[in-house]
């Protein structure tokens, strides 16, 4: 089972134009699409641990690959 990078774009709650990408490891196995669809609980946990940030979008990639599965905007967790 190969790990998949879950790349989340997060923006500061107090400054929504200040955004950055954070990388999480999705080890649930499966395809990039399955990663993208199963990501919300992982993202919600991360946002819960980092309350100054809100997730705005995410994608899954194999490490060192151009293969991606994008998901559009999310609603802020909380």
Image (cartoon, helix red, strand yellow):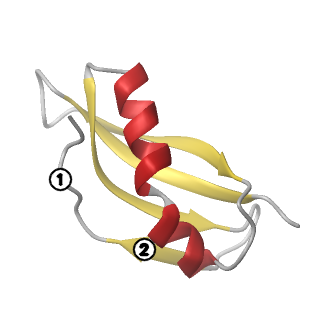
Q: Is residue 44 left or right of residue 62?
A: left
Nearest the camera: 1 or 59?
A: 1
- Which residue is depicted at the point 56% across and 66% down? 60
Q: Is residue 46 left or right of residue 55?
A: right
Q: Residues within 10 Å of mark 1 (few under 14, many from 20)?
A: few
Q: Quadrant of the N terminus?
A: bottom right
State the image quarter where residue 15 is shown: top left
Q: Where residue 70 sits: x, y (%)?
A: 42, 74
Nearest the camera: 10 or 38?
A: 38
Asked if 21 appears above or below 48 in the picture, the reply is below
Q: Where residue 46 sits: x, y (%)?
A: 45, 33
Upstream in sequence: badge 1 or badge 2? 2
Q: Closer to the camera: disc 1 or disc 2?
A: 1
Distance in Å between CA atoms under marks 1 and 2: 15 Å
Q: Is residue 67 left or right of residue 76?
A: right
Residue hosting label 1:
75
Residue hosting label 2:
70
Q: How many marks?
A: 2
- Which residue is depicted at the point 13% across and 34% down? 16
Q: Where residue 38 sits: x, y (%)?
A: 50, 64
Q: Quadrant of the C terminus?
A: top left
Q: Secondary structure at mark 1?
A: loop
């Amino acid at each position: 089972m190969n790990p998949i990078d879950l790349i989340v774009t997060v923006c500061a709650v107090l400054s929504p134009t200040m955004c950055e990408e954070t990388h999480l490891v999705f080890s649930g196995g499966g395809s990039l699409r399955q990663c993208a669809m199963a990501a919300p609980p992982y993202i919600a946990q991360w946002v819960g641990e980092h309350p100054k940030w809100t997730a705005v979008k995410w994608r899954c990639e194999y490490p060192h690959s151009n293969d991606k599965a994008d998901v559009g905007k999310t609603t802020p967790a909380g």
